[in-house]
């Protein structure tokens, strides 16, 4: 039977699990607010999982780690885990697993090109990988929801609104003014960042991913490659790189 690979991404908002074949085809995907042992047991019962890799923005869940190490070969993911790209970062131990995985996936998709990865989720994260597979670093700023929440939290009178696509510049009400400031502001930040990278490195590939991908993809000036499950694919590539057959 063909070996299958399970990867788990424990993010700030959602927790995801995906099963890949050896050829890189995703054959199972689940997303939950809280991924638990019952969810994973169900996946393990349905698929012949050989190897597993987990990524978490916080502390690992010991119950899940125990299950996976019992039923599969669990590959640890930390700052010393071998990678198919080189990390040129001053503090690799502080680099988020999602940033590493997205960069690995970007280089796998476009192995001979410079790539700018834009993750639009809880934070707006930009990461740059060169054509020769060197991760150079990038930037982190608040994401859309965080910006709305910050305006409400740090002021007395500004209410909390939620993101939505807008087609106006001038806000004719408090709600519209907040929406214009946040949605147009984050678009300007992205487009300005892309322009600066292109000025320095020339023609580059741009990948957009993350939970707010669809809210932003029509507003980016340059051609983009939208990749909904980029981090999961990157985790699979890291897992495959570390498997000794």
Image (cartoon, grey):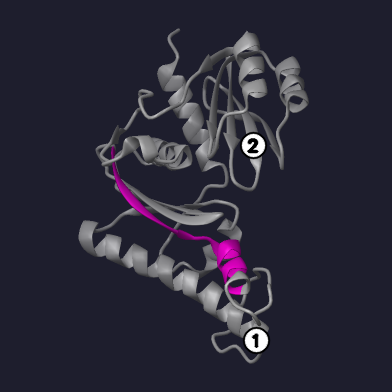
In the rendered image of this protein, does residue 6 appear above or below residue 194? above
Quadrant hosting residue 197: bottom left
Residue linked to disc 2: 16
C-alpha gap between disc 1 and disc 2: 36 Å
Instruction: Estimate how packed mark 1 is, as few (under 14), some (14 to 19) or many (20 or more) residues with alpha carbons within 10 Å.
Output: few
In the rendered image of this protein, does residue 89 appear above or below residue 41? below
Looking at the rendered structure, the secondary structure element under dot 2 is strand
Q: Residue at x 53, y 47 (%)?
A: 227
Q: Residue at x 28, y 57 (%)?
A: 203
From the viewer's perspective, is 40 left or right of 20?
right
From the viewer's perspective, is 74 left or right of 100?
right
Q: Which residues are magenta?
A: 134-151
Where residue 153 sits: x, y (%)? Answer: 61, 70
Where residue 183 sits: x, y (%)? Answer: 55, 73
Q: Is residue 184 magenta?
A: no
Q: Residue at x 70, y 33 (%)?
A: 35
In the rendered image of this protein, does residue 62 appear above or below residue 212? above
Where residue 133 sits: x, y (%)? Answer: 28, 37
Residue 174 — which label? 1
Which numbered disc, 1 or 2, marks the residue closer to the eye? Answer: 1
Q: Residue furthest left?
A: 200
Quadrant hosting residue 162: bottom right
Q: Is residue 135 magenta?
A: yes
């Amino acid at each position: 039977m063909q070996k299958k690979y399970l990867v788990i991404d424990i993010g700030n908002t959602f927790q995801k699990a995906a099963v890949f074949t050896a050829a890189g085809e995703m054959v199972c995907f689940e997303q939950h607010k809280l991924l638990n042992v019952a969810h994973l047991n169900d996946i393990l019962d349905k698929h012949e999982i050989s190897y597993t890799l987990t990524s978490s923005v916080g502390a690992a869940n010991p119950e899940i780690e125990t299950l996976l190490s019992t039923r599969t070969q669990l590959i640890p993911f930390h700052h010393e885990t071998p990678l198919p790209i080189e990390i040129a970062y001053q503090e690799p131990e502080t680099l988020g697993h999602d940033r590493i995985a997205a960069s690995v996936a970007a280089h796998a998709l476009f192995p001979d090109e410079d790539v700018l990865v834009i993750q639009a989720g809880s934070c707006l994260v930009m990461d740059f990988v060169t054509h020769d597979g060197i991760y150079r670093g990038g930037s982190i700023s608040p994401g859309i929801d965080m910006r709305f929440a910050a305006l409400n939290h740090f002021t007395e009178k500004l209410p909390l609104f939620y993101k939505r696509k807008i087609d106006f510049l001038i806000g004719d009400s408090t709600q519209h003014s907040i929406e214009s400031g946040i949605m147009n502001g984050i678009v300007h930040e992205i487009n300005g960042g892309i322009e600066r990278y292109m000025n320095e490195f020339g023609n580059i590939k741009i990948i957009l991913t993350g939970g707010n991908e669809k809210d932003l993809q029509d507003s980016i000036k340059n051609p983009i490659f939208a990749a909904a499950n980029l981090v999961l694919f990157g985790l699979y590539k890291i897992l495959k790189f570390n498997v000794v057959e």
